[in-house]
Amino acid sequence: MFGPKPIPTGQILPRTQIGQWLNMVAAKSLTVVESGSFCGLGSTYCLASGLPHEGQMWTFEIDESRFRVVEALYHLAPQINTVLGKMHVNKGMFPEQVDFMLLDSGNAEEGRLECEIALQRAKIVALDDIDGEKHRENYGMFRDWETLIEIKGPFPDRANGFFAARNPKYENPLK
Ligand SMILES: C[S@@+](CC[C@H](N)C(=O)[O-])C[C@H]1O[C@@H](n2cnc3c(N)ncnc32)[C@H](O)[C@@H]1O
């Protein structure tokens, strides 16, 4: 109750089921894009620590103070590209086709713009908060994709659901 506030580290944490799933998907990916790095030790760490040495990851954060923390954490890792800015505004920074995208940034409108990019460019997509304001309306955009995970409502370590799907145009890289 009293004393200093804990330093925020991340939201999707490595010890959780979703954190481990992200780590597994990253290990099978060569290109990963994440929107919403937060402080870099949540989903960003799950992905970065799974990515193969020859892989590349781009992680986007709009809050400058958070971005500086993330930049400091990963600046010695040449395959982790930390970016201050929005993913959909900087979409030219990463390849036309990416193996995996995690969309966990701001609000429903930003999320929708990111989902439009994922529809065009991702083999697998994951959305946090499908039972929250951010992605409740957006995840239906992937109705023609194969659902890999669909959790609505609270579950251990996530408050508002989680969704992942695979673009049926591509062979399943997770087999
Ligand atoms: C829910 S938190 C991300 C949590 C993180 N994925 C984790 O597991 O620790 C959302 C983050 O997205 C950032 N954000 C909000 N809108 C954004 C946007 N359009 N592009 C990039 N980052 C954004 C916020 O500043 C915040 O740090």
Image (cartoon, rainbow, N blue to C red):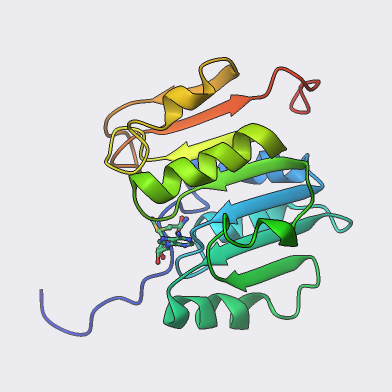
In this rendering, the answer to whether 30 lies above or below 40 is above
Position of residue 117 in the picture relative to residue 161 (left or right): right
Quarter of the image with the C terminus is top right
Residue furthest to the right: 54
Q: Is 90 in front, or is 156?
A: 90
Position of residue 119 in the picture relative to residue 16 (left or right): right
**Residue 14, image x and y in percent?**
53, 52
Q: Is 154 in front, or is 2?
A: 154
**Residue 40, image x and y in percent?**
53, 67
**Residue 5, image x and y in percent?**
24, 79
Residue drawn at x 68%, y 24% as measured from the top left: 167
Q: Is 61 in front, or is 121?
A: 121
Position of residue 70 in the picture relative to residue 172 (left or right): left
Q: Is 26 in front, or is 87?
A: 87
Residue drawn at x 70%, y 45% as measured from the top left: 26
Camera sees residue 17:
no
Position of residue 23 in the picture relative to residue 77 (left or right): left
